[in-house]
Image (cartoon, rainbow, N blue to C red):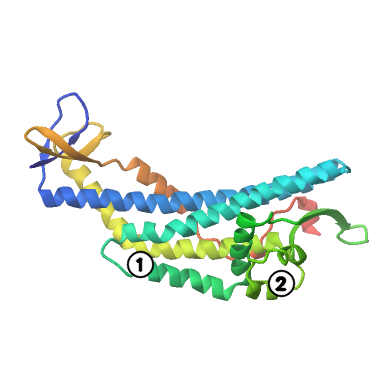
Amino acid sequence: MRHVIRLAVLAPAPQLEITAEEFSSLQAAKSILSSAFSIEEKYEILVSNFLALETQLLDIAVTNVVRNTLTYSEFFETRSSLNVRMVNLLTAARLYLDQLPQDIADCLPSNDTVPSIVKARCSKEYDEHFEYRFMEALRNHAQHRGIPIHFVSQGAHWTSHDEHGRMEYVVDIVAQRRYLEEDEKFKKLILEEVSGDVDLTAACRRYIESLSAINQFARDLIAESVNASRKAIEGAHKRYSELYSGNLLGLSAMASQDGRETSSVPLLLDWDDVRLALQKRNSQLVNLRKRYATGRTRDDRSM
């Protein structure tokens, strides 16, 4: 069996001989980086769905500033579109949480305690935050019994009754206890914590905070393994660059026997650069429940 690093091109290219152990190491490094990328990609999907929900709430409020929504059909369309956003968010959260233990385990192949470690970290958020518990139960309810948003309130009020007052337009989305009670499979312990309507905007923000904390935990847990894997591939690039000064696009580690290729490992890093960019863009979200976007003008803010 012969192992080399070379460009996967038809034109003649230098070949760098490596050992079977080095080939296996590069295989493992590529697999680890792929799993790390998978974590970031699914977290990006989660954050994007959260942004889509928040953006639509703002869009509805702005629309109400300039247009009158009067018919039942219009109210229905508004609630329906928001439910689509909410279902997408809950589905993205489940996708992320369900696959996270395996993704982390793939990044730490020698650590057989990963499933219990990840479960414990998720349980911490579950135990400490009602919103996390509720949103998990609501996801199950939406999957098996009913829609998650039961009522949408659109209104406006004066911020004050003096000359500085402004008309503020708001959109509230809520889950109502009376509908959740109809679902016999809705967790009773969580239902006992619900006294009436649940503000889903606030609940979503706290839920995303928890998921963001879990994601940061995952990043920290796999950081050493992932960094070492990237350095292994960067090392292969550096060694091959001593033989070839051109573009390294298509660089691969290859195994062959009797002149026939049996397996290959792409040694590209552009896609891993995307992972690093996602990490930078999606930093941990803290105090999200204390933040909100506003359409207030500069003069309004100076009052």
Name the residue beneath numbered marker 1: 114
**Upstream in sequence: badge 2 or badge 1:** 1
Task: Tell me where residue 87 appears, x and y as whole percent.
Answer: 63, 51
Task: Tell me where residue 243 appears, x and y as whole percent.
Answer: 13, 36
The residue carrying pointer 1 sits among few (fewer than 14), some (14 to 19) or many (20 or more) residues within 10 Å by Cα, namely many
Task: Tell me where residue 253 appears, x and y as whole percent.
Answer: 19, 41
When the figure is inspected, residue 49 is found, relative to residue 131, above or below; the finding is: above
For mark 2, give the secondary structure: loop
Q: Is residue 225 left or right of residue 264?
A: right
Is 298 or 43 nearer to us in this picture? 43
Q: Is residue 192 left or right of residue 96?
A: right
| Residue reaching furthest to the front | 184
Name the residue beneath numbered marker 2: 194
Is 178 or 219 nearer to us in this picture? 178
**Can you tell which quarter of the image residue 292 is in?**
bottom right
- Looking at the rendered structure, which numbered label has been put on residue 133? none
Can the viewer see residue 229? yes
Task: Tell me where residue 53 appears, x and y as whole percent.
Answer: 66, 50
Q: CA distance from mark 2 to mark 1?
A: 34 Å
For mark 1, give the secondary structure: helix
Residue type of the residue flagged with mark 1: Val
| Residue reaching furthest to the top | 11
Residue type of the residue flagged with mark 2: Val
Q: Residue at x 68, y 56 (%)?
A: 148
Q: Residue at x 8, y 32 (%)?
A: 259
When the figure is inspected, residue 9 is found, relative to residue 270, above or below; the finding is: above
Q: Is residue 140 left or right of residue 60?
A: left
